[in-house]
Image (tube, helix red, strand yellow):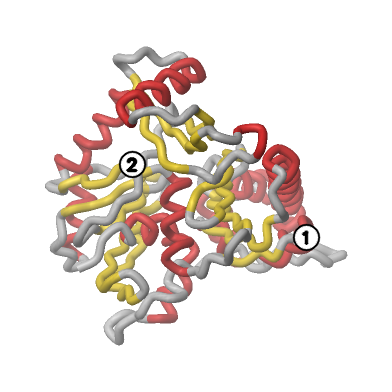
Amino acid sequence: MYPFSSKNIVGIDIGTYSIKVVHLGGSLGARTVKAATSFRLPREAGQVLPAVPAFVSELLSSKKISVRTVAALFTSGSLIFRNIHLPPMPEKDLKEAVSWELRKESGMSAAEIVADYMPAVDGGKKDEGKLSLMAFAARRAEVERSISFFKEAGLELRVLDVIPSALLCAFDLSNEWEAGANYAMLDIGESRSTLAILKERRLSFVREITIGGRDLTHSIANMLGKSEEEAEDIKAELRLDATAENAPAEMKAVRPIIEGLCAELQRSFDYYHAQYREGAVTHLFISGGTARLKGLDAFVTGAIGVASFTDNPFRKVRVPKGIDKAELALIAPCMTLAAGLASRGAS
């Protein structure tokens, strides 16, 4: 779960509805897209079938991706992450101290916990002289299941990452860092969203918000009496108009949920400013399937007063002639996490 550079890695983001795969070449500052694809998982009797190892292996082969070293996301229910501050100490002792802090939070025993950490932005005067860390932990059995999944697929899992650090890598791939500036990434997942505030190439604040794309889909389905699949198609064509007076039913279905998400974002930014005595967040980048909702970025900008943008992790990445640029731009917001994972390596 700790960022590092390794050669020739394919980033794989396995979601509830689709699998996203990105392979990048080149070197830092001169990346090239070798492959980028989003593949919807099959349905049976109206239900999405879960990804299985053979399916993932066949998908890579069908896209002529021969590389078998991968970086993947860990999103299991036992995962927790915390910003903690500890006094300086040897690395061996620090690992144990991080594990101890997270065991207290999670209730997991030393035998069942897997913990890791990465440097975070300094905590300010109240934590002066201490190490600021973003720490992650999960149940060992769930981590081992993830490792076994990719082994069964014939893949070598080099990195098992978490959403916040994948967002950090994705931002670094496609943006310039201004000294002292606070940036934010919001990944809207199926059942929850992850907010990461970034500063000077480090995580500064992370929070999970229990609002996701599924909430919008279910609201549309319930209001219009549609199936979930039909509601997904309606959502894909919907435009969120912040000033619409005679809004259609589907907009009335999603608007309160988006407003609730905006309220949680505002609370998070207010807390960050008050707790860490940091300046305002200057830019918010939104990723995930729901980020493709037309007008979402403008709506969020108006609601919270922070310039918000639909993320495109390939903004500064060279796209060769063999890849359809229009198609890539269409799926780009969904590819942020996979691109962040893939940015760990180049060939």
Q: Secondary structure at mark 2?
A: loop
Examine the rendering and report whether any part of residue 46 can be seen.
no
Q: Secondary structure at mark 1?
A: loop
Q: Which residue is mark 1?
A: 305
Q: Position of residue 176 (x, y in %)?
A: 51, 70
Q: Quadrant of residue 250?
A: bottom right
- Nearer the observer, 154 or 91: 91
Quadrant of the image for the N terminus?
A: top left
Residue 153 shown left or right of residue 1 in the figure: left
| Label 2 environment density (alpha carbons within 10 Å; few <14, some 14–19, many ≥20) | some
- Nearer the observer, 158 or 22: 158
For the residues labelled 1 and 2, say whether their Cβ atoms are less than 8 Å apart.
no
Residue, x 43% and y 33% (percent of image)? 136
Amino acid type of disc 2? Answer: Pro
Residue, x 65% and y 47% (percent of image)? 225
Examine the rendering and report whether any part of residue 157 can be seen.
yes
- Residue lying at the far right in this picture: please name it: 245
Q: State the count of labels.
A: 2
Amino acid type of disc 1? Answer: Gly
Residue 246 shown left or right of residue 29 in the figure: right
Q: Which residue is mark 2?
A: 50
Q: Position of residue 144 (x, y in %)?
A: 24, 30
- Nearer the observer, 143 or 50: 143
Quadrant of the image for the C terminus?
A: bottom left
Q: Position of residue 23 (x, y in %)?
A: 27, 65
* Mark with earlier residue (1, 2): 2
Mark 1 or 2: in front is 1
Residue, x 50% and y 69% (percent of image)? 175
Residue 297 shown left or right of residue 33 in the figure: right
